[in-house]
Image (spheres, grey):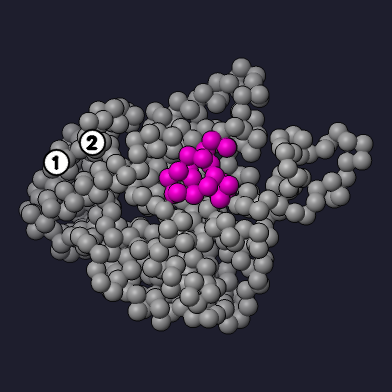
């Protein structure tokens, strides 16, 4: 049985969606009572004066352990393969710097990305140009990244291949295992920005063989705005020294946890010698310690809620709503640009619920997006015009809280708007 039987329960988590038609999961999740209740629980405990219930330092909180476990379930990883970041761009900066710290970037090296990358990916890697590193941009073919073009771009001087698992505008989703195969054959690493996928589609990092995966929590995971993960493949960890050092992360031996890690009260406590320059053999060595405790509480609640629904059932629902939307848009004469099925020779044509379409002109797309926000009675939130590498249109992103009736209303209104264009 799918999630249809739980739809009223799911919609009850988002109290504002009855006043509008919200089709914007790709931008930001609507206000969630699951997150709100957890954050308020954290602060209410603090108000009572309790630092002993996991509301003090985030990295000592039991919620941190639980949060890693829930996030790991969503991507088929081990909890120790995950460290926390506040946003995707922080994780991308960390990956760039970890690589450079261990094997300094040099003139002649290159990074491969695509013209379908989100700006945070490209902008983060621009810093490498100062060192003579080439940024190789693979161009799209009608939104598709062709295997032969990726293979031509990756060579023995490629250190990193950057992908957005799901393209921010089009919904085109990569066969990440195929991308990793191309990169690894040349000795390159892969960083996967999965913020548009995690919480909507099943992810299996072990099957894919991805080296780094980064994601924020506030889109398809329906989480708070300042939380996220950086996954690092276990086999890489011991060979990579952190670029960001924190005494909180040092490995003081088996069984030494909590405040026992920090011998502040010892007579021979020393700011250098008491903290050996060694770290755990997992992703905990990269933990920057920047996630706020209340955000962690909210995110843990959101992850636990998603896992209780089942990631396979979530994917089925999101995929189904996307297909239903595509059919409706085609019936009224729109050009649906998101792929139906995988295409031979392309790396990124797996379908998502994130749908890209056009009314037939850029001006018509812009006018339609404006009209959605001004729809009488119930405005339509979320549809927006997006372009990457010359490919784009109107982006619509239904999630598990949406109904087929809402999609029908959206399509009917788009039909009315097109008649006025």
Q: Position of residue 246 (x, y in %)?
A: 71, 49
Mark toward the viewer: 2 or 1: 2
Could you say whether the residue bearing mark 1 is in a helix, strand or loop? Answer: helix
Q: What crowding class fits label 2: few (fewer than 14 Cα within 10 Å), some (14-19), or many (20 or more)?
A: few
Label located before the other in sequence (2 or 1):
2
Residue at 48% x, 39% y: name it: 70
Q: The N terminus is located in which quarter?
A: top left
Question: Does residue 66 lie above or below 337 as drawn?
Answer: above
Is residue 401 visible from the viewing direction of this image? yes
Q: Mark 2 — residue?
A: 1
- Residue at the location (18% across, 51% down)? 323
Question: Taking 103 as reference, is 231 above or below it?
Answer: above
Confirm whether the magenta stretch covers residue 71. yes
Q: Nearer the viewer, residue 7 or 382?
A: 7
Measured as percent of width and height from the top left, residue 84 is found at 56, 46
Q: Is residue 31 left or right of residue 393?
A: right
For the image, the number of numbered tags is 2
- Residue located 28% across and 68% down the image: 143
Identify the disc placed on residue 36: none
The residue where tag 1 is placed is 409
Q: Can you say which quadrant of the picture contains the C terminus?
A: bottom left
Residues under labels 2 and 1: Cα distance?
26 Å
Quadrant in the picture for residue 54: top right
Q: Is residue 223 left or right of residue 386?
A: right
**Position of residue 137 measured from the top left corner of the image (x, y, whole percent):** 42, 75
Residue 213, percent across and down? 49, 56
Relative vertical location of residue 99 with respect to residue 139 in this rendering, above or below: above
Give the magenta-colored segment's residue range: 65-86
Residue 128 lies in the magenta stretch: no
């Amino acid at each position: 049985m799918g999630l249809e039987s739980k739809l009223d329960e799911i919609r009850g988590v988002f109290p504002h969606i009855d006043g509008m038609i919200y089709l914007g999961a790709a931008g930001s999740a609507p206000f969630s009572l699951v997150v709100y209740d957890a954050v308020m629980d954290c602060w209410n405990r603090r108000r009572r004066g309790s630092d002993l219930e996991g509301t003090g330092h985030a990295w000592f909180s039991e919620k941190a352990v639980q949060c890693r476990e829930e996030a790991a379930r969503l991507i088929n990883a081990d909890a120790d393969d995950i460290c926390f970041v506040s946003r995707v761009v922080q994780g991308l900066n960390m990956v760039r710097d970890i690589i450079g710290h261990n094997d300094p970037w040099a003139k002649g090296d290159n990074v491969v990305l695509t013209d379908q990358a989100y700006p945070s990916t490209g902008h983060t890697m621009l810093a490498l140009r100062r060192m003579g590193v080439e940024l190789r941009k693979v161009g799209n073919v009608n939104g598709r990244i062709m295997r032969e073009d990726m293979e031509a771009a990756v060579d023995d001087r490629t250190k990193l291949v950057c992908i957005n698992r799901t393209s921010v505008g089009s919904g085109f989703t990569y066969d990440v295992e195929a991308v990793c195969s191309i990169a690894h054959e040349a000795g390159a690493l892969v960083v996967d920005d999965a913020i548009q996928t995690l919480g909507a589609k099943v992810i299996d990092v072990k099957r894919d063989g991805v080296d780094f995966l980064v994601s924020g929590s506030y889109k398809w995971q329906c989480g708070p705005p300042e939380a996220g993960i950086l996954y690092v493949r276990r086999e890489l960890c011991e060979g990579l020294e952190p670029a960001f050092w924190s005494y909180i992360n040092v490995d003081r031996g088996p069984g030494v946890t909590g405040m026992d890690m920090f011998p502040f009260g010892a007579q021979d406590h020393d700011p250098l010698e008491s903290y050996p320059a060694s770290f755990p053999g997992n992703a905990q060595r990269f933990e920057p310690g920047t996630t706020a405790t209340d955000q962690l509480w909210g995110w843990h609640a959101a992850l636990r809620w998603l896992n209780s629904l089942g990631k396979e059932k979530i994917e089925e629902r999101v995929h189904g709503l996307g297909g239903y939307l595509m059919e409706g848009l085609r019936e009224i004469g729109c050009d649906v640009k998101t792929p139906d099925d995988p295409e031979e020779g392309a790396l990124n044509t797996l379908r998502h619920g994130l749908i890209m379409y056009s009314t037939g002109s850029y001006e018509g797309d812009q006018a339609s997006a404006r009209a959605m926000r001004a729809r009488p009675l119930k405005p339509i939130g979320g549809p927006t015009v997006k372009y990457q590498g010359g490919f784009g249109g109107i982006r619509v992103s239904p999630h598990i809280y949406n109904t087929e009736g809402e999609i029908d209303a959206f399509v009917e209104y788009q039909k009315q708007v097109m008649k006025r264009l």
